[in-house]
Image (tube, coloured by chain):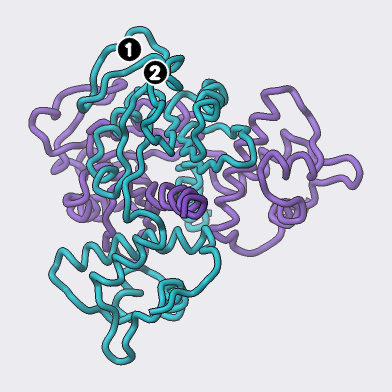
Chain colours: A purple, B cyan
Amino acid sequence: MSAKRGRIPKITIERLSVYLQVLEQIQREGVAVVSSGPLAEACRVNASQLRKDLTYFGEFGIRGVGYNVDELINAVSRSLGIDREWNCVLIGVGNLGKAIIGQREFVRRGFRIIGAFDCDPFKIGEAFAGLEVVCTRHLKDRIRDKNVRIGVITTPPEHAQRVADYLVGAGIKGILNYAPMRITVPPDVTVEYVDIFHHLYSLAYDLALRQD
Amino acid sequence: MSAKRGRIPKITIERLSVYLQVLEQIQREGVAVVSSGPLAEACRVNASQLRKDLTYFGEFGIRGVGYNVDELINAVSRSLGIDREWNCVLIGVGNLGKAIIGQREFVRRGFRIIGAFDCDPFKIGEAFAGLEVVCTRHLKDRIRDKNVRIGVITTPPEHAQRVADYLVGAGIKGILNYAPMRITVPPDVTVEYVDIFHHLYSLAYDLALRQD
């Protein structure tokens, strides 16, 4: 099995995330082998797109038979770097922050939130899902030697940049930003923006087209 | 001003969402006119991509001068159908549901959650941000004549399909699904999936490449 060389584009990773979700659904149903047609249909992509995307992971498909579900899940996970655990911290313990801290899916997929931070004196010292909320000023000290690689920002937009600066100062190179605000970071830091509004805009656009 | 005809692709809407966010940031700073170079840089796209995307909204750019910020915001909003209000309901009042109900950004962008539903008898009757939680079985009755167009699913994955069926049965044509589960709906219903894991996978992939 020889994996195709080259960096996986972001747009492909977005589809791989869907494939993984669907493959895990299929796996739970006890299916061992799936061919590209039904898999593509369940993922709502066309089959040639799916086959092309999966070439990043070597030669899995056996013509006329299909993909081994377990093997494919493992190969995709390994290639994406999610076959290991990633320690994360979260900053901003509002409802959204609490929802994320409590989400079992995060841990199940290897993303372990090991610290929760907030500036609000009424939240500091409280505990959620076993995590004590610590003042954001202590971020750097608290995560020293803990191999934290990812910081999740769930603060209001006006605090996002300051929090990003704290994360960068603590040596974190990957940021997941839920705050609806663009942030500026050094070139060696990667930011992913969770922008749910483009989904709502897509829906509104679609519904408006029918209405007008 | 003649708007380019044709349907705006989803990938363009994703970028438009970023442009809007950045334009609103610029507007708050009191800037009236912006040229494509700095705007593109703030949006982290290249300038020719930005200029191309904005042709959907007619001839805004004045060569050598730039885009009028207010006009551009209005034109993009109008084209996307977010210059009006969209009534939404939310099903699944856990931490994530509460975070969404309480998010001012939703209302500010024209998405008004007018009903909150949950099957949990311990939640029914409770109120969040002025919304009383109602049993999901009453969805159809409760939203009759209220012009609800969008349903937001924030339940655990195992309940997502049943909730989608309720929404479809109540005549809703647009679904925003936060549950990490694919759902099946009739062809005249649009589903948008909020999948935050592909963002985490992108970060993990990026960080793993540096580590390996």
**Mark 1 near mark 2, Cβ–Cβ under 8 Å?**
yes
Q: Amino acid at mark 1?
A: Ile
Q: Give me the residue at 17% from left, 50% from top.
A: A159
Q: How many angstroms separate mark 1 from mark 2 (CA)? A: 7 Å
**Residue A147 seen in this snapshot:** yes
Q: Determine the chain carrying the residue at label 2.
A: B
Q: Amino acid at mark 2?
A: Asp
User: Residue B124 appears at what percent x and percent y?
Assistant: 32, 12
Give the vertical position of B94 relative to B110 (above or below): above
Asked which quadrant contains residue B123, the reply is: top left
In this image, B31 relative to B135: left or right?
left
Q: Give me the residue at 62% from left, 39% from top.
A: A20
Give the vertical position of B5 relative to B166 (above or below): below
Looking at the rendered structure, which numbered label has been put on residue A150? none
Q: Give me the residue at 61% from left, 47% from top.
A: A16
Label 1: element kind: loop
The residue sitting at the top extreme is B121
The residue sitting at the right extreme is A64
User: Residue B185 appears at what percent x and percent y?
Assistant: 61, 34
The residue sitting at the bottom extreme is B64
In this figure, what is the number of numbered marks? 2
Name the N-terminal-most of marks 1 and 2.
Answer: 2
Q: Nearer the viewer, residue A13 or B203?
A: A13
Asked which quadrant contains residue B28, the reply is: bottom left
Count neighbours of disc 2 (C-alpha within 10 A) and say few if under 14, some if 14 to 19, many if 20 or more. many
Give the vertical position of B167 relative to B30 (above or below): above
Looking at the rendered structure, which numbered label has been put on residue B118? 2
Q: Give the residue at mark 1.
A: B124
**Residue B204 seen in this snapshot:** no
Label 2: element kind: strand
